[in-house]
Amino acid sequence: MTATLEPRVIAPQDAAEAAATLAACARDGAAVVAIGGSTLQSIGNAPRRCDVALHTRYLRGIREYDPRDMTAGIDAGTTLAEVARVLGEHGQWIPFDAPLPARATVGGTLAAGWAGPRRAVYGRPRDLVLGSTIALTDGTLARAGGMVVKNVTGYDMSKLYVGSLGTLGLIVRANFKALPRPPVRRMAIAPIADDLRDRTIAAIGALAIEPTAALVIDGFARVTTYPGASLRLVLLFEGSDAVVERGTRDARSALGKAGIAETLLLDGDAADGALTQLIDAYVDAPGERTLTYRTTGLPSGAWARTRAADALAHEHGLTFESIADLRTGDAILRFSAHTIASFAATIAAFDADVRRAFDRATVLAGAPTLRAAVDAWGSVPSTIETMRAIKAHFDPAGILAPGRYVGAI
Amino acid sequence: MVTSLASRLLEALGPDIVRSSPEDLAAYSYDAYSEGYLPTAAVIPRDAREAALAVRIAFECGEPVVPRGAGSGLCGGAIPARGGLVVSMVRMNRILELDVRNRRARVQPGLINLDLSRAIAAHGIFYAPDPSSQKVSTIGGNVGTNAGGPHCLSYGTTTNHVLGVEYVDGEGVIHHTSLDDPGYDLTGLLVGSEGTLGLVTAVEVRLLALPESVRVGLAAFPDVESASEAVSAIIAAGIVPTALEIMDKLITAAVEAHYHAGFPLDAGAVLLVEIAGPRDDMLAGEAAIARIAKQHGAISWRSADDAAEREALWASRKGAAGALGRIAPNYYIQDACVPRTKLPAVIHEIGRIARDHDLPVGNVFHAGDGNLHPLLCFDRRDPRAARAVVEAGTEILTTCIAMGGTISGEHGIGHEKRDALSLVFDTADLAAMGRVRDVFDPQRLFNPDKIFPTGAVCGEVRAPAAVA
């Protein structure tokens, strides 16, 4: 990192001011990093330069929310908790499934391309975005999509902006499709004995009432705990009373046949709270001596990827924790050392081994020293030249979070 | 140039793949919207390699490339508006890979939508997007227009079910995109781009588990407005059926004469409701829906008790447009979308517009999504009526925009609506899309004269042709 000076903080009052700020920065060649709730800033590489920190804190508010249409236009700086509260009053929600919702913003969550453990059922945030407005470096505000749930009018530009990590412009507003919030929510936590884990995972795959989330968690000792168990299965059932009841009953019976006698149940707010804590842990970096990767791939391979990573941790003398997402295929791999110094000494060789073991592993969180020592993205996709061209067309001056994105974009 | 494209293609791919005689090319000169644009050549490749070779040759000759699935598109997306090469995907119709456990399939773009779900049903899985054209339309065409269908109310549209694509660029290079890859969401950009960014040669789709149970109910209402109010009320109650479809009296009569599914002929509108999910929710869900329908003026409620009855109702709904042949020699189907709560007002306005232009109008639409399909009946041999249809169609679009809606919910912009796109988006909005076009297709040879408005709105008004 070459940035030495503290960046200048600019917090535009409205979308037009945001666009004007970007145009001014482009003219001056000032590098801009967009800041929402700073909950996912650990995603991607540290930008090579940051002259201006562009905050969305004044771009907040839920506009055009008509509960009968179940659509809402939401300004970028609005927190996820605020969205949950306002929509919740009408029995609706937008399942962002993102960490730290009290601080996390809608714009930041979209820009980071966050997608959580319930996406197999509710879709990714990208799937619920109906339209967007983005401020571009030429000073214009460009809209895409609209406020209707079906829309094929020109390119679906919102898809491009979601996940672009502030490298193409600043998302200032997004329109969403809201969903009815499931009235009943229940989490089941079961300990898994080492010798039973394959049977357990197979049993879960055959449930008639599919859980909205199904995770095998190893470590992460402060969340979704089960007394005395490090390895545990977490299932979430959401829906009507009858469906959740049957889902739990079937799951318990299947687990019983797989040799697991006991299951801990959490209901309603307790289930919500436990899930929030769990998702928070995805990006938690306790003790400043951990590094967390997310690998993506087929759901059937998620568990195997955590085992391969476990072996890798042993080779390098690291402590290992993991979350295998049986529904989405994500595997969250958290490595930690006794001291930051010992980890930092071998980080390059370790990261190279991680990249060799997994096609798609990106750094999700961790100690800044460790993150600075690796490329967060590892490999580049085969379409990287197209991505570079997109970047060049949207940000010709190269001022938006330079170096943060895939392939040093 | 003309001989050069056809002869180079013939030399590279042979006569089995290449078509170049005028009589053969006529088959590629139209789609369900329009006709009369003859391409210079057509190819019917068997795989991505052959398709890529054809694209490269066309670009080297400076000729446009127009992808073609079933030609069932309703807005001129598949017509070779500036000649060039039509790439027909009919031979690329295979399922390349099926992963039942992970519920994914990799398919070729020429695979017919319904053929996919039929082929995998035995595994207890299905492909959710189901446009009414699904018996003929292809997955590739569906990807091009981000097609919807009655069931996208709860399942979402095509874009929500595409995990990655394989596409060919203007140099004939084959690329792969995946939602699992880091970087910009090129998959999301390509879906709905109507063939203007590249030629899609394979699609990785997400499959869903077949619901444990499905129930279909039919409510009759005195008019479309009350049926629309009931739709909003059902959704406001926190129920999201898998489909909520309304047909007005004119459509119901045409459909009943053709299919004999038992639709009530005295009703001003019928509402077809489908719910699907675990069996535990079915009875309560159906009872709640029937109650809400009655509260909003439903004259009758009927449950389809078995699969055969359900399928008969659905066949009627999906065949509604075709059944209109009984009423008029031609019809023009409009596609627009409004916020759901605006449905009663917009239906009222559509009725007024049709009366002003002296055109019979039928309404059959995806009410849960606010996605309208007014069908304007006319006889294309009557020039006055043909003109009136174009004018009424435009008025319907401006009405929908004024109510917070948009000009296409699922058919796309294509050739037909490209000038209407500037009613929705301003210069800055279109410029952002133009940048994407510049990246993928700087020569503007992939499906030209589609989506993007012409510089000036041309005075020439083409009477929409239509299937009947």
Image (cartoon, coloured by chain):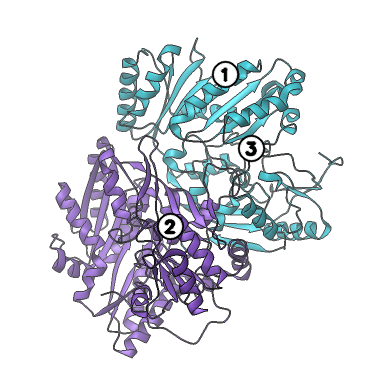
Q: Which chain is purple?
A: B
Q: Which shade of the palette goes to chain A?
A: cyan
In the foreground, B94 or B103:
B94
Asked if residue B111 lies left or right of residue A304, the reply is: left
Query: Residue A63, how many percent across, how many down?
Result: 56, 54
Q: Few, some or many C-alpha atoms within 10 Å of disc 2 (few <14, some 14-19, many ≥20)? A: many
Pointers 3 and 1 in contact (CB under 8 A)?
A: no
Q: CA distance from mark 1 to mark 2?
A: 41 Å
In the foreground, A62 or B22:
B22
On the rendered image, what quadrant is the N terminus of chain A found in?
top right
Residue A257 picture quarter: top left
Query: Residue B331, how many percent across, how many down?
Result: 29, 76
**Residue with the most extreme top position:** A228
Classify mark 3: helix, strand or loop: loop
Q: Few, some or many C-alpha atoms within 10 Å of disc 3 (few <14, some 14-19, many ≥20)? A: some
The disc at residue A311 is 1
Eyeballing the image, is A88 above or below B141? Answer: above
Q: Identify the residue under disc 2.
A: B143
Name the chain letter of the residue that bears numbered label 2.
B
Q: Amino acid at mark 2?
A: Val
Query: Residue B82, how many percent across, how many down?
Result: 49, 77
The residue lying at 71 percent from left, 32 percent from top is A371
Classify mark 1: helix, strand or loop: helix
Classify mark 2: helix, strand or loop: helix
**Residue with the most extreme bottom position:** B383
Would residue A64 be visible to someone looking at this image?
no
Q: Amino acid at mark 1?
A: Ala
Name the chain letter of the residue that bears numbered label 1.
A
Please identify, in this view, whether the residue under mark 3 or under mark 2 is nearer the observer. 2
Name the chain letter of the residue that bears numbered label 3.
A
Q: Identify the residue under disc 3.
A: A103
Of the residues under marks 3 and 1, which one precedes in the sequence? 3
